[in-house]
Image: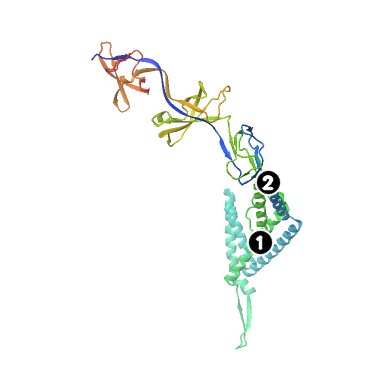
């Protein structure tokens, strides 16, 4: 058969895929109240533009107002002058009890041992909190000094303090002889004294924290109280929670816009009783986007950043440029066909009124080459997976197998990146090419 040939030419190659979808707002929510009630007012209407934070509807709130007033009164009552005076007395008693517990422990273990135990604890804390080498060195020396002196104090306790303080003399009933001995405190006695001192210290800390809260006043309690220990402090925290809940319940009788947008629908009128079902639909209109579908065979063209050409059914003569912004990672089934779901943005001309929900046809630009070298796909010979060559026709009519690098290709033409130049003649086999 006579050989069919064609010349390598320059031209444009554009790979596209077609899909369809709808215009949707970037934000759209159905808003409802957190509790049931009677609608008192709806100051907006369908189609109205509203700002972020604007009140959209309110419920009857007389009960919530009363509950808030009661919670506020109960909270402020805890900060009365009588409560302040009682707190001062409680703190003074706690301090007296702490002093007594400290004195009892010093008596049992000796003031000397107690002092160096305290110094040791202070040195341990300082070493733990030291940040510089100088601070660490000083804290370490203080720690070693306290350890040495505590050991000496404990020896003096056994040799001197116990015999001198806890000496006990009794008369033997049989011999009538006076016997001297010592009754040193037991380990249980000392452990109980230490526990009593710890408890007294906690009581002082609780009483002091409670007094500071009262002195600061009710207006200062705006956040959860840290480390709530005492009963009175816990009462203030519970009253604060009750007040916050009452404020929240009152706030829940108002429906406000979470963002600026347009009211699409209202599902009830003033005077009607509603529950927590959606009451109002709000959507943005200034920043629309497109959600569309492609056949799964066009997955290679579904990449974020690829250009789009949109044609609205309502404006068939207007082509709107756009861009793919996201590709969902799971196929969906539409009319029984698996499809890829994509999202995109587009330019919205001022002279077109584009509404949410409008139907749109989408052309995806999967790739394009301008002023590229092109040959018919029939000229390509695959010599290895992904590697191609063509038969270039010489001046004498002889064929020479020439490796080429292929770029874009569609069902008709292929882009040649290297291996040929414009005007070269290549064989297309037995298929006639004009």
Give the crowd class for mark 2: few <14, some 14-19, many >=20 residues within 10 Å.
some
Residue position marked by numbered label 2 in the rendering? 61
Q: Quadrant of residue 280?
A: top right
Residue 139 coordinates in the image, percent (x, y): 59, 54
Which tag is nearer the camera, tag 1 or tag 2?
A: 2
| Mark 2: secondary structure | loop
Residue at 32% in and 27% down: 386
The reply to whether residue 416 is visible in this rendering is no
- Residue furthest to the top in view is 395
Label 1, label 2: how far apart the Cα atoms are: 43 Å
- The answer to whether 209 appears left or right of 430 in the picture is right
Residue 163 placed where, x, y %? 62, 74
| Screen quadrant of the N terminus | top left
Given the current orientation, which residue lies at the most extreme bottom position? 174
Q: Split into 4 quadrants, where in the image is the C terminus? A: top left
Question: Does the residue at mark 1 contact the one at mark 2 (Cβ under 8 Å)?
Answer: no
Say whether residue 148 is left or right of residue 433: right
The residue to which callout 1 is attached is 203
Residue occupying the point 65% across, 47% down: 249
**Looking at the image, residue 411 lies above or below residue 277:** above
């Amino acid at each position: 058969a006579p050989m069919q040939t064609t010349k390598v030419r320059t031209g444009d190659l554009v790979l596209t895929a077609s899909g369809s979808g709808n215009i949707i707002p970037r934000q759209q929510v159905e808003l409802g109240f957190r509790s049931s009630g009677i609608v008192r007012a709806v100051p907006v209407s369908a189609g109205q533009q509203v700002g972020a934070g604007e009140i959209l509807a309110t419920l009857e709130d007389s009960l919530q107002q009363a509950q808030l007033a009661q919670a506020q009164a109960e909270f402020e009552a805890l900060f009365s002058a009588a409560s302040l005076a009682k707190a001062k007395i409680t703190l003074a008693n706690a301090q007296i009890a702490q002093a007594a517990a400290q004195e009892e422990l010093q008596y049992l273990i000796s003031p000397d041992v107690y002092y160096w135990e305290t110094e040791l604890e202070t040195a341990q804390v300082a070493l733990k909190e030291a940040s510089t080498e100088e601070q660490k060195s000083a804290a370490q020396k203080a720690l070693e000094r306290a350890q040495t002196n505590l050991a000496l104090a404990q020896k003096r306790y056994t040799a001197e303090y116990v015999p001198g303080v806890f000496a006990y003399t009794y008369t033997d009933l049989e011999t009538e002889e006076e016997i001297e001995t010592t009754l040193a405190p037991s380990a249980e006695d000392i452990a109980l004294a230490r526990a009593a001192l710890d408890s007294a210290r906690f009581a002082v800390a609780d009483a002091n924290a409670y007094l500071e809260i009262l002195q600061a006043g009710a207006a200062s309690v705006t956040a959860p109280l840290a480390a709530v220990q005492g009963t009175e402090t816990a009462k203030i925290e519970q009253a604060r929670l009750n007040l916050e809940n009452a404020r929240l319940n009152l706030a829940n009788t108002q429906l406000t816009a979470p963002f600026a947008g347009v009211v699409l629908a209202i599902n009830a009128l003033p005077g009607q009783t509603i529950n927590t079902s959606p009451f109002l639909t709000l959507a943005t209109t200034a920043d629309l986007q497109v959600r569309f579908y492609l056949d799964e065979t066009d997955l290679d063209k579904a990449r974020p950043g690829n250009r789009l050409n949109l044609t609205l059914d309502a404006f068939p003569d207007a082509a709107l440029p756009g861009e793919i912004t996201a590709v969902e990672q799971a196929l969906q089934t539409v009319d029984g066909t698996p499809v890829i779901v994509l999202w995109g943005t587009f330019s919205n001309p001022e002279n077109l009124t584009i509404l949410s929900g409008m139907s749109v046809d989408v052309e995806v630009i999967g790739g394009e080459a301008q002023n590229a070298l092109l040959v018919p796909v029939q000229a390509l010979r695959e010599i290895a997976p992904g590697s191609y060559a063509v038969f270039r026709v010489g001046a004498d009519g002889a064929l020479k197998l020439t490796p080429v690098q292929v770029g874009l290709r569609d069902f008709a033409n292929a882009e040649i990146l290297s291996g040929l130049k414009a005007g070269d003649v290549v064989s297309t086999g037995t298929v006639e090419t004009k």
